[in-house]
Amino acid sequence: MKVGSALRKRYAQLFGLLMLVLVATGWAPMAQAAPNCQASSATLSMPTTIVVQPDGPVGPIDGTTGTATIIFNCSGLPASKAANDYTATIQAGQTLATLDSTNNTSGPGITFATSINGLAVLVTALPVQATSRSCLACGPTSTAGYVPGAVTAPSSAAVGSYSGTVTASYTAQLIKTKATTIAAGTIKQTNLIPYWWYISGGSVNSTSQSLGATLVLPAITITLPTCTITAGNNQTVTLPTVDTSQLAAAGKTAGMTPFSIAVTGCPDGVDIASNVFNNGTVSNTTGNLTNTITGNGGAKNVQVQLLNGPGSSLSGALNLSKTSSAAAQNSGTFDVVNNAVTLNYYAQYYAAAAVTAGAVSVSIKYNITYQ
């Protein structure tokens, strides 16, 4: 009988131990995710090089837009069953980049200054428009910015079980802000807008926490348009064959031939200040080009004279023996229309004395300046 009593006692101990395990399992608390929001920085897809008319009108500059999208991911909501702990709010601002003097704090958009005088970047946003007004939910110190959106858990969500996203899309536009001449240079890379998140009220009532994410303006090189010679760097002007009888005495001319230099792509509001011809073989007496074929077969006593043509502010022959500054006064100015202009000239034979038959060849360089 003692054996049976011992067995019953062992069963009772095992049963008691099993009950203890069940009680311990039933009392273990469930793991809950702490509320958290995350995002990554985004760089606006602006062109790396932008050509700006230096004296263009105030307003948006064509071909200078860029876009970016930032996705904010919030998880672990609601923070508790308190009413206000269901929502995590995204903040944009607090330490905005330097604002341009033309910025409107109420929008639409935020106008940021750049490192080039007269140029700014206007940043607009969707689905919530960006502004720079001061408000309670615009940053840890209630400073300038706006709220892109919020993630709210449904009322039925268990504590810490809900995740959601907010998507903000941005468009940036380079604008000219004042009637000033724009200089070439580089707009520096700039962190325009930093981002934060917080839970307001409830049992958490968190302070704003940095997401470590920013909207970035990339570095942009600003260049100015330059006049382009459409025919390239080299042109050939062919004068006709003439009889030496037309050049039988000093001062006689023959074979006048028009030629042009076509220029396009000039900046708005400029004129061709001068087209200086230089670095040719020139007679100091007449200011004309002398024949470079000096041996057998070359014509003697013949020169080539250049003259201003239609459209120039001056008329008459150019004295190519003058220095560049003085030669500019000979070549006249030309009006640029629709960013293009044609510089018209004439070339003709000129007799320094009675001319003998032969070939003629001359060359000259030209340097176009505009203002």
Image: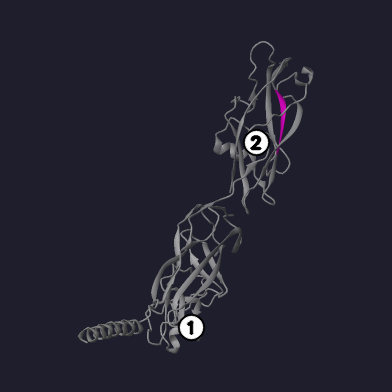
192 up-or-down from 11: above or below: above
Mark 2 = which residue?
232
**Residue at left 41%, top 80%?**
142
What type is the residue that disc 1 sits on?
Ala
Residue at the extreme front: 1
Q: Is residue 310 magenta?
A: no
Label 1: which secondary element: loop
Which residue is found at the position 73% from the left and 41% from the top?
A: 310
User: What's the colour scheme?
Assistant: one colour
Residue 302 image offset from top left, x and y in percent: 69, 20
Q: Which disc number belongs to residue 291?
A: none
| Location of residue 44 in the rendering, given as x and y in whole percent from the top left corner | 52, 61
Q: Find disc 1 in the rendering and name its residue.
A: 157
- Can you give x and y, in whole percent of width and height, for residue 260 in the image? 71, 37
The mark nearer the N terminus, 1 or 2, is 1
Q: What span is colored magenta in the figure?
A: 344-350
- Give the residue drawn at x 65%, y 24%: 362
* Count of marks overlaid on the render: 2
- In the visual, does 259 lie left or right of 120? right
- The residue at the far bottom in this view is 83
Picture quadrant of residue 8: bottom left
Between 175 and 293, the one nearer to me in the picture: 175
The residue closer to the viewer here, 130 or 206, is 206
Alpha-carbon span between mark 1 and mark 2: 72 Å
Question: Which secondary structure, mark 2?
Answer: loop
Q: Is residue 9 above or below residue 249?
A: below
Q: Residues within 10 Å of mark 2 (few under 14, many from 20)?
A: few
The dominant secondary structure in magenta is: strand
Mark 1 crowdedness (10 Å alpha carbons): few <14, some 14-19, many ≥20? few
- Picture residue at 53% right of the left edge, 78% below the top: 106
Asked if residue 345 is among those painted magenta in the image, a careful observer would answer yes
The three-letter amino acid code for the residue at tag 2 is: Gly
